[in-house]
Each structure stands twice: as C-alpha cells, then as structure tokens.
Amino acid sequence: MRRLGRLYGRDTPAHLVAMLVTYAIAAYGIWAIFQGAEPWSVLLWLGGAIVLHDFVFLPLYTAAYRLARRAGGVEADRRRRVIALQHLAVPAMLAILLLLAALPLILELSTANYRPTTGMTQEPYLERWLAVTAALFVLSGVAYLIRVRGDHAKAEDASAG
Amino acid sequence: MASILSLGLGVLFTIEIVTGYLSYVAYAPTIGANDVAGGGPDEVLFGWTWFTEPAWLYGLNQSLHVLAGVAAIPILAAKLWVVMPKFYAWPPARSVADVLERGTYALLIGSSIFLVFTGLFNIAYWYPWSFGFVQAHFYAAWVFLGAFLGHLVIKFPVMRRAFRERGVLRPLREDLAATEPEPYDEDTSAPLEPDPPTISRRGLVGVVGGASAVMVGLIAGQSIGGWTRSTALLAPRGQDPAFPLSQGFQVNQTAAKAQITPDLVGDDWRLAVVGRERLELTRQELLAMPQHTEDIPIQCVEGWVSWQTWTGVRLRDLARMAGVTDPDELFVESVQPAGAFDDVVLRGSRATDPQSLLALKVNGEELSLDHGYPARIMIPASPGVHQTKWVGRLTWRPS
C-alpha cells in the first residue's frame, strides 16, 4: 500500500478520490459538449481562456509589475514611491477590469444584436466608462494626499516628541 | 495568502453553481421542448416544479448569479497572480499525482474564465464564437463543477491548516513594514523566491474586495430597479428609463426583432384557447371577463429585473372555460414569426396560480407592441422568456 502510495505520489487516498471525481464529472461535461453543435469551438475557447491568461495577461501584468518595481527605485524613499505607485496601480487595474467586464458595451461590439433586442443604443457606455475611470483616479489621488499628509504629521510628531 | 482569496472565491463559485442549477430547473427543461441546453435532462435532478412564491424569486436567483460572477473577477485575477509562481516550479511534475493534479488546474482555470466571460458577453449580446451560448455555458459548468469539487477535497485541508496556524484575520493586521513573505511550503502557494512585498496583505485583500464592490456597485442597479437603475452605469440594462423605451421600462425583445407586424395583432387577432373544448376570444371579450391586477417583475435570465403592475385575465379562468380544471401543462404559442422562445410549455400548477395572468394592460395602459400587445403571459417568479408575448394560442393538457 505504501509502495503504491509512493508510486502515485501522495500518502492518502483522498487525492486519488478527488482526481477521479474531477475527471469523471468533467468527462461527462466534455462528452455532452460533443453531443451538441460546434464542440471544437467550445474546447478552443476553454483552452483559449488558459492561453490568454498564461501567455497574454500574465506576461503583461508581470511586465507592468516589474516596470513599477524598477520605478520604485532607491531604498531611502522606497515607501513613499511604493505608496504613490499603489495609488496609480489600483485605479488603473480597476478601470481595466471594468473594461473587460463590460467590453461589448463600451466598445460597441454587439450593436447589431443589442439594438434590435433591447431597443436601446450602446452609445452611452464609452463615456460612462471614461467618467468612472477619471473618478477612480481622482479618488485615489485624494486618498494619496490624505495618506501622505498623515505620514508628514506623524513624522513631525515624532521629531517634536 | 491564497487562503483568504480562496474562501471568497469558494463562496462566490458555490453561489454560481447553486443559482445556475436553480435557473435551469426554473426553465422546466424536462417538459415539452423547453430544454435549451439539449441532451435530455434527468427527471429527478431537474424535473421538480419551480416556485411561484415569492414573485421575485427568479430575479433574485439571476441577480445573484450575474453579480457573484462579476464579483469573482478581481478575486480570480488576484488568486491566479498569487498562485502563478507555483505553476512555474521546476520540474513541473514529480509523480503521477502531480500530473493528474496539473490537469485539474487546467480544467478549473479554463472553465472559470470561460464561464465568467461567456456569461458577461452573453448579457451584452456579443457572440464572437460559433457555438450556442446556453449549451456551452451549461456543459462547461459541469467541467467546472468536477474540477471545483476535486479542488475542494485537496485544498480545503490546506486552507484549514493555514487558518489554524496563521489565523484568518491575524495576517491582515500587519502593515506594509511588518509584512513578511510566507515561508516556502510544498502544499501552499507560498513561492520559493518571493520579491520584497509592495503591498500588505490587508492592502491586497482591501483592494481586491474593493474592486469587487465597485464592479458590483456599477451593475447591481439593473437588478434592484427604481432610481438605482441610473447607478448601474456599466450594466447592459442600466439605461435611464427616460430613454425612449416603450412605456418607460426595459423590453426583453422588441416587436421588430420578433417580426411582429400590425396585421398579426390587429382586429383579426383572436386568442385560441384549447382544452376539452376549443374557443376563440377577441380582445374585447377578454377585457369583458373578470380582470385582476398583480405586481409581478419581469425577471431576465441575464440578471435584470423590472417591477410592473399588470392587469388581465387569470389563466385559471381561461382553463375552466376550455373545460379543464386541473391541467397538467399549458402550451403557449406566440404569433411571432421570428426570435427565440416563440412557444413554451408551462407547468399546470404554476399557470393556475391565482397570480398568473394573461396580461392585457400594464400600469393601467394598453400593452405596447414591444411589451406584447394584444396579450402576454405574466407568471410570478418565472424566467422572462417564459412570459410569452403576442400570445396566439393556449393549449391546456388535462392531467
């Protein structure tokens, strides 16, 4: 039993049970996908989701992170720069997530379906997204100023004390 | 660090699985040609009768489904960011177990991203793929379900251990200066060579939670309705009712899209009611019957809700006129020549609920063409596409 476990790579049978559950149910899902229309297209998009994340988004945000770290620069005022970067990165990240979540609306990608179905146009969404993005940067900037001022006050208190 | 993100994601994904399942049941996929996912669903699992009380139940279910999916996006992104270094460990697998486990991560990550984004693109009516959305979303959810359950079995003990050793909230008390990377561990997501921290744990949890809250906040108004709809800036159905929408509220499918022409619903229109007897009713005759008024929301599978006050004839009265008192099913057919859901089979018990109407008016006005003139079905807690518009024939099947 222990030898089998070593051969498999885990001590407890729970792992093997979990694997069997996963592959059994997932296999049913994939089998069912193949009963329907365009199964390869579904699999392409399922796999494409991983490829897109691992080979497009991950390198992009890793690069952004590396760049930001380099800008973080000299150790002496590292904290201040890290904080400044945080206050730029957070609204930027949120704006990108919102863009992703409402992509077809903001870029008017689905007007051909949206308009006849709902009776509305997609025109307002780009402006709305830009306004939300601007508001996020402004709010983050205000929060930064408050935080930096708080730091200054603390530093002054420390020097006075 | 992954533990607290996993907890949030685990809760949200559980909501997705439960609400997704309930929504499928609400479509009554085991009767008639209602099954939009294909494949002949199981009678025991999916064949029970969905509720009519409370009247907003389906809307709540779908709002949760859409909003939990939106809220999951920042957490999923953060979690992938946190665990990614582990995926680049070398060698990538040291045993059969490792190889199998790797495969389940591919299924889990692929299906999560697929489900969230096919869902979001569907509610905005963007279909950049050639497969049918409902079927693909439904069966990809099975792939996800398997991978999620397996992942829980393996990782729940790891999460519990992390919480026991480090506490759930204790790591969140440290500020940036006090934040130390977790020591390397084979079973957790802690990386081998971490960079110096640029954000505290509470900072990360705050940013991720805040991002989820902002995203939900910019969409939730389409579910709540009223003045909050104008706060749903980035929701597909978040536009101001002042926009020239027919009768001031959201249309789930316009008359133009369904190719409804005036002659289809003009003076020659008759409602055929078929049961043990067969009769044809003009709109005047329907208006002369006892009228009932009910507040019932339109509740779309896409997660938007619109409360309106409907007036019309009780469906159970129409059943009785056709000589059927305890119908098993009601087959509803629209006169619409195009568009989805031109017919549907409803369960008899739901159709004969005292609140279930063949609505002729909304908010005291005649229905507009876009809202289903001359008559539409309104059943409490029902998916929007089952509230058939431009009804032409009702066929009662006695039990």
Image (cartoon, coloured by chain):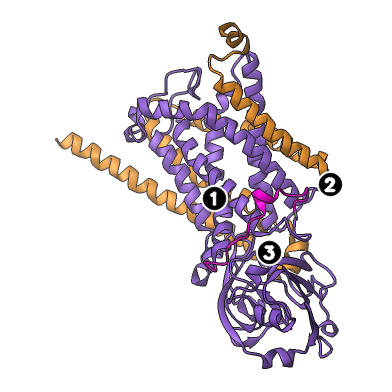
Chain colours: A orange, B purple
Secondary structure, mark 1, is helix
CA neighbours of label 1 inside 10 A, class few (<14), some (14 to 19), many (20+):
many
Q: Does the magenta stretch mainly form a helix, a strand or a loop?
A: loop
Location of residue A13 by image quarter:
top right
Secondary structure, mark 3, is loop
**Mark 1 — residue?**
B68
Foreground tag (1 vs 2): 2
Residue A89 seen in render: no
Secondary structure, mark 2, is loop
Instruction: Identify the chain of the residue marked 3, using the numbered disc in the image.
Output: A
Kind of residue at disc 3: Gln
**Mark 2 — residue?**
A37
Q: Give the range drawn in magenta.
A: B37-55
Q: Residue, x 68% and y 70% (percent of image)?
A: B387
- Are marks 1 and 2 in one subunit? no
Q: Whole-Å distance between the Cαs marked 1 and 2?
A: 29 Å
Q: Residue, x 54% and y 26% (percent of image)?
A: B154
Foreground tag (1 vs 3): 1
CA neighbours of label 3 inside 10 A, class few (<14), some (14 to 19), many (20+):
some
Q: Whole-Å distance between the Cαs marked 1 and 3?
A: 24 Å
Instruction: Identify the chain of the residue marked 1, using the numbered disc in the image.
Output: B
Q: Nearer the viewer, residue B150 or B12?
A: B150
**Mark 3 — residue?**
A122
Task: Quadrant for the N terminus of chain B, please.
Answer: top left
Q: Whole-Å distance between the Cαs marked 3 and 2?
A: 30 Å
